[in-house]
Image (cartoon, grey):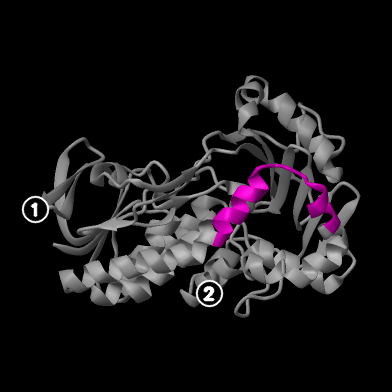
Amino acid sequence: MYDIIVVGGRCAGASVALLAARAGLSVLVLERAAMPSDTVSTHLVHQPGAALLADWGVLDAVAASGCPPILRSGYRVGDIRLEGSARPFKGQQAAYAPRRNVLDGVLVDAAIAAGVEYRDQATVTGLLTEDGRVHGVRFRTPKGGVQTEECRLLVGADGMRSSVARFTGAAMASEDPTLTCVYYSYWAGLHDRFELFEAPGRFAGLVPTHDGRSVVSVYFPQSEFETVRRDSRRIYVENVAQLVPELADATVDDERFGKLYAIGDQRNFFRQGHGAGWVLIGDAWHHKDSITARGISDAFLQSDLFASTVLPKLPDPVELDAALATYDVLRGQELVESYRNTLSVAKLDLQEERLRLLRHVAADPALVQDYFTVVSGGLPVGEFYSAELLAEALN
C-alpha cells in the first residue's frame, strides 16, 4: 500500500508528489499520457508561482532549460498604454513561460529523484472502495493489462475532465458560463516582454517561451467559437494583425508561425474538493478561463498548501478528513477573488469607467507597477482597486 496515489502527473500532480515524497511518504503517480509531452497551456508561471518553484529547488532547472526570464510587462487598450513590471514576490522578480514538456519534465524528474514511483501511459478505469472510503485505483497499463494499487489517500490531479472526479461523483459546488475560446501559436522574432492587448470583444496576449519563440494568443467570445473554427487561421491572423502592433504585417502564409492550437471549452467552476479517502487538486477541483493565465501558479499554490495542511495528518483517517476540510476552506479563500476577477476580464466588455481608471493608472509609474503586480497575483485585486483610487480616477 502506498501512502498517496496521484492520478495525473503534470504540474499539479507532479508537484504534489514531489512534496509528499520529500515529507517521507510513499507515492505512486499514474499519468495517462506518455511523458514528457506537450499540452495546450497558457505557459505562464507568474512571480508567485516562480517563488514556489524556487522554494522547491527546481526554478534553476527551468531557467537552465533556456526559458527566458520575463522582467517587463505591457498593456495596450485603445490610446492607453502601460509599461513596467510587477513588484518582486518573495524575492522573485521574473516570471517564466516554459513549454509544458519542459516544466512538467522538470517537476517529474525532481519527484522521481525524491523517491516517487512514476508510471506514464497508465489510464485509471475505476476506484477501490470499502465502506464508502476510497482506498485505491484500478488502471490499464501501457500493454493493455489491468492492475490495482491501494493507498491511504487518492489525489485526483487529472485536469478539468477529471476521471477521479467522475468516479467519486464529485458534484459542482459552483459553476459559471463559459465565456471565451482561445487560439494561439508560437511566433519567431518577437520581443521578450509579456504584453496584453485589448479591444471591444477581443483580447490578446504575447509571452516569450523557449527557442526564441513567443506564444501569441487571441481570445474570442465563446459565442463565436463555431464561426472562428470554420476559418480559424485567417480569423486568428487578422486579429493578431489588428491587436498586436509588432505583428501588424502578419499574413496567413507568414513563416514566423506554424501550427495553430485552440481551446474551445474553458469551463469555470469549483467542484466538491474532497471526500472519504480522496481529494481533487489543480484543474480537477477548480478551473477558470485562461485569460488571466493563473492556472499553473494556482496549481502550485494548491500543492504547497496541501503539503503544509494535509500531509502531516495522513496517518490518522479522522485527522486526515478534518485536514482535508480545512484545506478546502483555505484554498477557496485564496482563489475565489482571482476567479471573480478572471470572469470579469473574460466578459471582453470594455466599459468607459474601466478605461478612465486605466488612464489614471497609466499616468503614475507606481500605480502601473501595482497594476502588473495584480496581474501576476502578487497583490489582491481589492487592495489595488481601493475606494480612494476609484474616487481619484473617476471624479
Would you name the residue on which mark 1 appears? 130
Q: Is residue 300 above or below residue 29?
A: below
- Closer to the observer: label 1 or label 2? 1
Q: In x, y percent, where is residue 388?
A: 78, 72
Q: Which mark is residue 11?
A: none
Q: Amino acid at mark 2?
A: Ala
Q: Residue furthest left?
A: 131
Of 21 and 102, the residue lying toward us: 21
Q: In x, y percent, where is residue 263?
A: 56, 36
Q: Secondary structure at mark 1?
A: strand
Q: Is residue 237 above or below residue 156?
A: above
Quarter that holds the N terminus: bottom left
Would you name the residue on which mark 2 appears? 54
**Is 348 colored magenta in this rendering?**
yes
Q: In x, y percent, where is residue 154?
A: 24, 57
Q: CA distance from mark 1 to mark 2?
A: 40 Å
**Is 284 colored magenta in this rendering?**
no
Q: Secondary structure at mark 2?
A: helix
